[in-house]
Image (cartoon, helix red, strand yellow):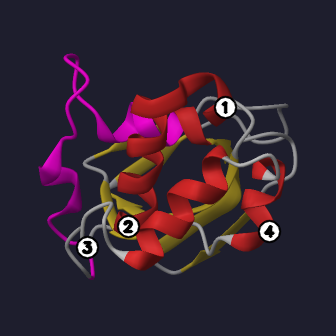
Amino acid sequence: MDKQYFERSDGGLRGVVGTVEATEVVRLITDQDGAVREGIFDENVRIYLSAANRINERILDTALSETRGEFWYLNNGITLTCEALDYTPGTRAPRVRLTNVQVVNGGQTSHALYDAFTRDRAKLADVLVLIRVIETKR
């Protein structure tokens, strides 16, 4: 996240909204061997519908297009939940540490970005993604 992020807390919930590089999303959802960690999507609203799905094709095409810099504006982003999030507020591009993370919304986007990464990781370096992280013990 750059310095443009927003934090909110209410009772037992805490959230951070910001922007991350698409390559960081890919890093989050993959294991050491570069395979998607499907368990990170156990709490997702929908399972991945494949790159052949019309909507996912459009997400993938946008991420690899000449206008990929507009991805942040065209995509709804990704919502994560975690048991704990840790970062230093007020810093530029803070490293955020997440414990027991789940992608609860944005599974289609996450997988499409992974597919884009496998096709042309250089182009994906220009893609930014809106992200919301919710810390909850529930």
Q: Is residue 41 above or below residue 94?
A: below
Please tell me whether mark 4 sits on a helix, a strand or a loop: helix
Task: Identify the mark nearer the N-term, 3 or 1.
Answer: 3
Q: Which stretch did the figure color magenta?
A: 24-45
Upstream in the sequence, badge 1 or badge 2?
Answer: 2
> Distance from label 3 to label 1 (Cα)?
27 Å
Q: Mark 1 — residue?
A: 123
Res 33 quadrant in image: top left
The CA distance from mark 1 to mark 2 is 19 Å
Residue 82: give x, y in percent of width and height: 35, 57
Figure quadrant of the C terminus: bottom left
- The quadrant of the picture occupied by the N terminus is top right
Residue topped by disc 4: 73
Q: Residue at x 70, y 43 (%)?
A: 127
Vertical placement of residue 9 versus 125, above or below? below
Place of residue 124 in the rendered image (x, y in percent of width and height, measured from the top left):
62, 35
Name the residue beneath numbered marker 3: 44
